[in-house]
């Protein structure tokens, strides 16, 4: 909470140092361990003159907001695990002044109310100076730091209807302004009643030889999150008050008389992730409740949502925060963690004093990706799809990738692989991708599997996701140029494959691997199970758990062929940065699995691959994987994929798995069909979505960035721009325009950008290609291959 509003919060200069040794101690309030609590720390120090740099390393458990002389300059630490706990290195000199200065921090531990993505050891705070000057003045455990618990904060329960949807982001907040020590961040604040913080343990990183390792500190490896001021655009309903024109899109005071109840429904018009700010004056003892929702539901059981722009007759449920004003002037309220919303419901109930709502706005926050990719083609819906996909990707990217910002905020490997590719094709920024790859590597179990989601205070394993993690590493190898980074992941890749090998049956099929055998959200997989057959794993047999049918031994074509792909991806990685022997061994195993599976799962009568050897069920997934594995090629692959697209009896791929279906179309020589495969996204646009659903309605989450695959595929499949070698040192351009007569675009590349302009004239292709310095490749169209060199070149190709 703050005394004065700000258009946006400035940030200290974030530095990216090498790992360092620490001289400070972690500190904490007396007696605080794991329980819910918000704590305020402050250290006042004097400077004769402001140095050119004043560098501090800052961290906390759970999290902190850092202030210098009343100005918030950073939020952190970026999420990690106890073994890899992050700190921010900040130059705060720009906020200092001669004389008295106050370095202050709000630190909170949400205890049992914490998001599932938040790992914690105990409440604690750390400041460690870069030089003897900073160390003497502000080091925790050396300089005098005072602290107090801010009793203004308490948790607000999540509505039970939301918890039924697996709601993992934590509870809301209640803030009672009468209990908050206003002005606590300023040097002149009277802190005589505050207690000294107590030392906990010495700070230590991976370079420190200390006997008791607590938080193993590592530098933050991603930038600070973007914070951008945005106004809420529309008022949809107002009850109990006349609202001035222009509210809330324009700043204008709204006076709520004494003893009045008011309810306002506000519409951002698009989904956002933001810290919602309220500025109020007066209103002592009033209740201000803010409820946040992605959208309205069509029925009270929360099953479907229908048109997102329609609210009449629909049902509302949302996470909420509560604020109790103290009567002060221009009090600014803001939750300590960002919220996800399109709609905001504001409920105000005053007591004997009127309340003035001075302003309401959002401080939109996400990872600071910059959109660099360009795409131009008719019809205009391509631009709409790219815009909505990019918004979805931005809202699902914060200090980690998140599966959905409203319900979970968890980083899942299956989602993240697609999200990372969107980041590379749209922004060319791999820092969040590297962070994710390394975090999954850190999460490996003793058996060798990566956790399905991480960071997470509760472990979960989805075996397929460990293989998709290998695919993510292979993606980084081919689309970025950092062989040393990938080489450091070889041990984890080998352990994942070794774990799967332990479950291979003598006939080279994947047996009953433990844990949740989720594969895709497929409605057809929730049906009955033949006698003696299993739905993997044994404990997960409830409908709708995303688990395909397997035979009594656990065998399934979906898992066999995903393992074979994992072996091939690992072989590519080994060949580029590892061991030739490991590469050959991985490919030999992939060949054995593929050979055995081809015989086991092919159904001659249906001309399809079955999900199991019993040939009871068939899916798009099994046949897509057969093509991606090269089990069928050429004309046979094309015929198979035509059946995959036309046979409605097959278990249908969800939004997530369509990423792989479309890769298989390209592999089978049907890439020209891609432009007509966007009907699912067109339907979401028609329903008024501003981000992509988790699955097509009915859907819980309507912001899932695995649905942003067109932000990769329009460039990689339609324009045909792809990597043909590790480090993207060779480019393959194989356009598949379908019925389009022309298209153009550019994508970021580790050495610059790749650009194409494509025009079809009769049977000919006119292509202008622009490659970065030192990059060559090939242009493929109509059965003709032309060499490409760096720089700008023009080509005319007549098909064979």
Image (cartoon, rainbow, N blue to C red):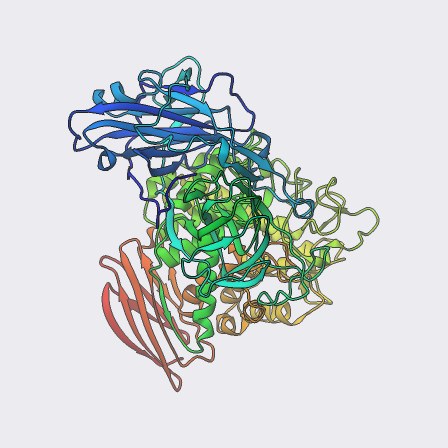
Is residue 139 toward the left or the right of residue 131 in the image?
right
In-image side of 393 versus 22 (left or right): right
Q: Nearer the viewer, residue 622 or 222?
A: 222
In the image shown, does 309 or 730 lie closer to the viewer?
309
Across and down, in percent, residue 735 comes to 40, 71
- Residue 85 seen: no
Above or below 294: residue 118: above
Furthest toward the bottom, the residue is 762
Residue 16, located in which quarter of the rendered image? top left
* Quadrant in which residue 756 is drawn: bottom left
The residue located at (40%, 67%) in the rendering is 720
Name the foreground residue: 699 vs 271.
271
Look at the picture and state if 205 lies above or below 704: above
Q: Position of residue 534 (x, y in %)?
A: 76, 46
Locate residue 7, reporting x and y percent: 35, 50
Quadrant (top left/top right/bottom left/bottom right) for the C terminus: bottom left
Work out whether residue 294 or residue 427 is closer to the camera in this orientation and state it: 294
Observer able to see residue 202 = yes
Determine the residue located farthest toward the right in the rendered image.
531
Picture quarter with the N terminus: top left
Q: Position of residue 506 (x, y in %)?
A: 67, 40
Q: How many marks?
A: 0
| Position of 745 relative to 764 (above/below) | above
């Amino acid at each position: 909470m703050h005394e004065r509003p700000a258009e946006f919060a400035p940030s200290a200069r974030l530095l990216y140092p090498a790992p360092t040794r620490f001289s400070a101690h972690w500190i904490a309030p007396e007696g605080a361990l794991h329980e819910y609590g918000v704590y305020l720390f402050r250290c006042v120090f004097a400077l004769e003159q402001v140095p050119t740099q004043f560098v501090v390393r800052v961290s906390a458990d759970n999290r902190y907001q850092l202030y210098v002389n009343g100005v918030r300059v950073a939020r952190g630490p970026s999420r990690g695990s106890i073994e890899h706990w992050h700190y921010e290195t900040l130059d705060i000199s720009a906020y200092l002044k001669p004389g008295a200065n106050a370095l202050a921090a709000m630190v909170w531990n949400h205890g049992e109310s914490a998001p599932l993505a938040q790992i914690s050891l105990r409440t604690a705070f750390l400041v460690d100076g870069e030089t003897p000057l900073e160390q003497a003045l502000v080091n925790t455990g050396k300089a005098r730091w005072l602290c107090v618990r801010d009793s203004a904060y308490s948790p607000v329960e999540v509505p039970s209807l939301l918890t039924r949807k697996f709601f993992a982001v934590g509870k809301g907040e209640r803030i009672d302004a009468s209990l908050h020590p206003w002005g606590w961040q300023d040097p002149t604040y009277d802190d005589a009643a505050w207690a000294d913080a107590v030392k906990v343990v010495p700070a230590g990183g991976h370079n420190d030889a200390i006997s008791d390792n607590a938080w193993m500190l590592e530098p933050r490896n991603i930038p600070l999150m973007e914070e951008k001021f945005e106004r809420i655009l529309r008022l949809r309903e107002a009850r109990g008050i006349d609202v001035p024109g222009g509210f809330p899109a324009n700043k204008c005071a709204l006076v709520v008389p004494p003893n009045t109840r008011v309810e306002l429904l506000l519409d951002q018009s698009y989904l956002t992730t933001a810290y919602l700010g309220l500025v109020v004056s007066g209103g002592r003892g009033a209740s201000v409740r803010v409820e946040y929702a992605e959208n309205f539901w069509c029925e009270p059981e929360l099953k479907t949502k229908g048109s997102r722009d329609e609210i009449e007759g629909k049902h509302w449920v949302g996470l909420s925060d509560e604020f109790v004003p103290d009567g002060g002037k221009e009090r600014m309220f803001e939750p300590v963690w960002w919220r996800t919303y399109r709609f905001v419901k504001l409920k105000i109930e005053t007591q004997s004093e009127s309340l003035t709502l001075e302003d309401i706005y959002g401080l939109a926050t996400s990872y600071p990706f910059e959109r660099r990719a360009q795409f131009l083609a008719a019809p205009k819906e391509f631009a709409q799809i790219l815009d909505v996909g990019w918004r979805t990707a931005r809202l699902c990217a914060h200090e980690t990738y998140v599966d959905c910002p409203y319900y979970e905020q968890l980083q899942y490997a299956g989602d993240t692989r697609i999200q990372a590719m969107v980041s590379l094709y749209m922004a060319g920024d791999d820092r969040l991708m590297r962070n994710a790859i390394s975090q999954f590597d850190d999460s490996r179990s003793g058996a060798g599997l990566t956790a399905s989601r991480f960071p997470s205070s509760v472990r979960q394993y989805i075996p397929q996701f460990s293989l998709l993690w290998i695919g993510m590493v292979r993606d980084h190898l081919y689309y970025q140029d950092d062989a040393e980074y990938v080489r450091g992941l070889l041990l984890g890749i080998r352990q994942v494959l070794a774990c799967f090998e332990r479950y291979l049956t003598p006939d080279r099929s994947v047996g009953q691997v433990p844990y949740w055998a989720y594969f895709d959200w497929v409605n057809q997989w929730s049906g009955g199970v033949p006698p003696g057959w299993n739905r993997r794993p044994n404990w997960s047999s409830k409908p709708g758990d995303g688990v395909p049918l397997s035979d009594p031994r656990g065998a399934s074509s979906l898992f066999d062929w995903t393992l074979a792909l994992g072996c091939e991806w690992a072989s590519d990685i080994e060949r580029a940065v590892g061991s030739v022997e490991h590469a050959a061994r991985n490919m030999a195993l992939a060949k054995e699995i593929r050979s055995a599976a081809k015989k086991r799962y092919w159904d001659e009568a249906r001309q399809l691959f079955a999900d199991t050897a019993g040939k009871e069920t068939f899916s798009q997934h099994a046949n897509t994987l057969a093509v991606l594995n090269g089990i069928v090629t050429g004309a046979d692959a094309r015929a198979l994929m035509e059946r995959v697209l036309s046979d409605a009896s097959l278990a249908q791929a969800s939004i997530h798995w369509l990423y792989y279906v479309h890769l298989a179309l390209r592999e089978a020589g049907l890439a020209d069909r891609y432009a007509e495969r966007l009907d699912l996204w067109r339907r979401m646009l028609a329903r008024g979505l501003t981000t992509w659903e988790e699955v097509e309605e009915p859907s819980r989450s309507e912001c899932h960035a695995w649905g942003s695959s067109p932000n990769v595929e329009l460039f990689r499949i339609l324009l045909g721009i792809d990597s043909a070698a590790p480090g993207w040192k060779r480019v393959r351009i194989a356009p598949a325009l379908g019925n389009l007569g022309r298209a153009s675009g550019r994508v970021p590349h580790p050495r610059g950008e790749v650009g194409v302009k494509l025009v079809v004239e009769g049977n000919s292709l006119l292509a202008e290609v622009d490659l970065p310095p030192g990059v060559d490749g090939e242009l493929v169209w109509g059965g003709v291959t032309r060499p490409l060199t760096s720089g700008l070149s023009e080509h005319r190709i007549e098909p064979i």
